[in-house]
Image: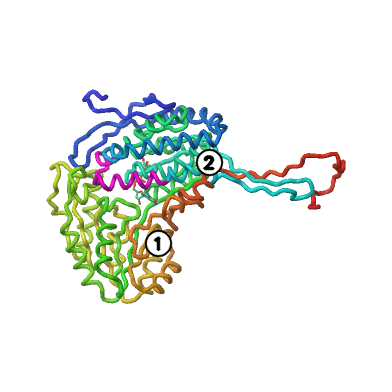
Amino acid sequence: MTETGQPRLAHWADNAPYTGAGDRTAPVTDPATGQVTGRVLLATSQDAHAVIRSAKAAFPAWRDASLARRTAVLFRFRELLNERKQELAEIITSEHGKVLSDALGEVTRGQEVVEFACGMPHLLKGGFTENASTGVDAFSVRQPLGVVGVISPFNFPAMVPMWFFPLAIAAGNTVVLKPSEKDPSSALWLARLWAEAGLPDGVFNVLQGDATAVDALLDDPSVKAVSFVGSTPVAQHVYARGTANGKRVQALGGAKNHALVLPDADLDVAADAMVNAGFGSAGERCMAISAVVAVGGVGDELVAKIAERAAALRTGDGTRGCDMGPLVTAAHRDRVASYVEQAEMDGAEVVVDGRTVRPDGGDGGFWLGPTLLDGVGVGMSCYTDEIFGPVLSVLRVDTYDEALELINASPYGNGTAIFTNDGGAARRFRNEVEVGMVGINVPIPVPMAYYSFGGWKSSLFGDTHAHGVEGVYFFTRAKAVTSRWPDPSHGGINLGFPQNA
Ligand code: NAD
């Protein structure tokens, strides 16, 4: 507790809270009321190295634990998570602001990765070749790396960490999770759940903090790999510094996702999808649709349909059954609103204005309602920048080719979607578009746990995507073994280069 009676959110090491030596803290706020609900510790680099040491000490025994033992813990974690996910969803809503149903959806998508990781014995199977040469067998195994760091953003405080740590732990690594300082409690809740599931001390640890904690993870030689998710500039920094220090890094960055609506699309289906994907979680999703590209004259009808739906949404406290919650902080709300002001000055039409919203929530909440901008041009900052709020921009073009060119010119390539009833057009789009995750009449095409998640271009730095088989590869390294057991017929000394015989 702090002097003012607010909870002090500590680090977590060796299955217990750890306060470290540093005294820097940051406020944690309920975005629906604006009230400070706690203070989170911000690690010094010494604190970070101490938490990393716990993870390092735990590695040899966890690496050597049998797959049966490791997956038994994972199964227990899955069962506890499934029983108690409502608790976790309430924590997410209280610090992030997203509505409860959305928070529950986030936990469920994370749980799917835990379920995938329960199949680790199958995923780690290597190959075996008998008699590659006479009396020689060849085989491959995949082994864990050691301590791995996971650095996560504010917008999915449970799901994004769960894209990584179930696979890392199941594969035999130990983990240091650095959650966002804006909503740090979910990570601690997950840590307690691991302890209850029987995970040995030091296998899953939480390091609270900001850039100091991140840089310590990137610099500490005991950390062998880092999975990062956040904005593009920070992803670039993490990738450059981590790889310069010889680490394996996957750094998932920002996004600007387009939805292309062709003239033959069902416009009611498309409008529903734009509203769900544009305003769900107040637009604070890396797979949110933020730019709608209306092709060949569908613009007027589509904008009218989206506007009607957006205006009917209820913005308010996420615990009250509203459609959309507040933004995460006051500063972020003001930043998003400033893009709407600038768009107006740049000549866009504000069709639905979230700045005038009357929320069902506290006066101090960080409110901005759904906002629809029409007549947006490619030079406007509301189009070029990642806004990360409930602002949907509509651009109009004449042809499919123009739409494709526009999408492919974006520096980001996280997600995209096409709305059409023409299978040939959809097929062409999924083939030609330079984006990592594509939806066909599906607005937020987040891959299932057994596929891998990741964008192209400035939306991902590194070679491997998150979860799925690529996640297993990221958290393990391959070893190829060639073995001969001499039998009485072995041929004695031969200095020649080994050849198949
Ligand atoms: P952020 O980049 O501000 O923070 C992400 C993490 O980096 C946090 O843990 C934060 O503490 C840390 N951090 C912040 N500044 C840092 C610095 N200068 N040096 C080192 N570490 C630093 O991102 P955010 O605002 O928390 O999250 C929103 C962003 O994340 C958006 O850009 C969104 O598109 C992106 N995101 C991407 C994906 C994806 O899969 N590509 C998924 C979710 C979110």
x then y, percent, for residue 172: 53, 36
> Tag 1's secondary structure?
strand
Mark 1 or 2, which is nearer the eye? 1
Amino acid residing under circle 1: Val
Q: Main SS of the magenta segment?
A: helix
Question: What colour scheme has been applied to the protein in the rendered image?
Answer: rainbow
> Per the image, is 460 magenta?
no
Crowdedness near tag 1: few (<14), some (14–19) or many (≥20) residues, C-alpha within 10 Å: many
Q: CA–CA distance between discs 1 and 2? A: 34 Å
The numbered mark, 1 or 2, whose residue comes first in the sequence reads: 2
Crowdedness near tag 2: few (<14), some (14–19) or many (≥20) residues, C-alpha within 10 Å: some
Q: Is residue 24 above or below residue 403?
A: above
x then y, percent, for residue 202: 46, 29
Report the residue marked by disc 1: 438
Report the residue marked by disc 2: 245
> Per the image, is 95 magenta?
yes
In the image, the segment drawn in magenta is 92-112
Amino acid residing under circle 2: Asn
Q: Is residue 150 above or below residue 133?
A: above
x then y, percent, for residue 432: 44, 69
> Tag 2's secondary structure?
loop
